[in-house]
Amino acid sequence: MQQTQIEHLLHVLTAQAKRIEALSGQQGEVQRSLDLLHELAARATGEGDANPESAEDADDADDADDADGKGEDPSKKKKRTKSGSNPQPQLPLVARYFELDEADRMCPQCGGGLVVWEGQFEVSEMVDVIEVRYELVRALQRKYVCGCGGCIETAPGPERVIEGGRYSLDFAIKVAVDKYLDHLPLTRQARIMGRHGLEVGSQTLWDQLEALARQLDAAWRELFVQLMHEPVIGLDQTSWKRLSGAKKTPWQMWCVTGRRGVYHQICDDKSEATFTALVGRYEGVIVCDAAATHGAGARASPLIVLAGCWAHVP
């Protein structure tokens, strides 16, 4: 039984190794790993003497583990699923030429000058980074006039998130991506921009986000409409601190989730009335906690079926 399992695992590992070999092109390393796996399997089943070279490689691998301070049982280690460099198919491929300096274009044997060997290169790949750069763009919108003197037209200017504002639409989008996808607070973004020579405050960045949100209002509302057509949605709410001290009761941020997206809306409370106003017309299954207001709202809407959320099971 053990031998059958070992043979099956070797078959799977061999197929996986060949696939990795085809992707990475590192034939020598993959083949050595396969030889070592077969040798270790033979030793485990006692079906043959280990090859001295393979055994030495295995001992070296154990020594390397000990040198790292791990010393773990190989059977308990997580098996590697990848080998070699990632192919990076989504990155643009850019050719960059590297030339010899004039002083180095001399043959060390005869002292003659070196000339370019056409079409011959030593080729390798590397991943590089292009630093973010902020520019102060002077937009020159050209004017056009008719010979009759009765018409003057001006070319359209660049897109801005705030009409007549100083910041481009791309700038506002970057602020939003950095904040909501990469979780960079606006104050931290302002410090980063300062290192690149741009003087800007967090309030200005917030103004850009607010203007961008207003432009996306239609998409935000349509997202909720799409979620209301799904057969199953998730529903939850959490408190949201009020910025003013006038009222101590916090707002409630309601969250509706589905296969097509996630919708958030800040409401005054988590009452039955708010539940009904938000999802009272929904027809389907709502996965949520056992709040009494949810049950009351569902009873008033017979087409809603509540399903308990496992995350709230005590």
Image: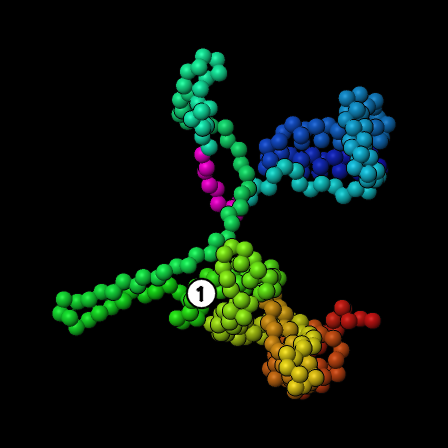
Residue to which mark 1 is pinned: 167
Q: Residue furthest right?
A: 46
Report the front residue among 60 and 38.
60
Locate residue 267 relative to residue 10 in the image: left or right: left
Coloring scheme of the render?
rainbow
x%, y% of residue 283?
Answer: 62, 78
Which amino acid type is marked by label 1? Tyr
Residue at x 81%, y 31% (from the top left corner): 63
User: Residues in magenta?
Assistant: 89-97
Can residue 70 be seen in this snapshot? yes
Quadrant in the picture for residue 2: top right
Residue at x 59%, y 37% (from the top left corner): 23
x%, y% of residue 194?
Answer: 53, 58
The 10 Å Cα crowd at callout 1, few under 14, some 14 to 19, many 20 or more, is some
x%, y% of residue 304?
Answer: 66, 79
Residue at x 45%, y 28% (from the top left corner): 101
Report the front residue among 190 and 248.
190
Q: Main secondary structure of the magenta part?
A: loop
Confirm whether the magenta stretch covers residue 145: no
Query: Split into 4 quadrants, where in the image is the C terminus?
Result: bottom right
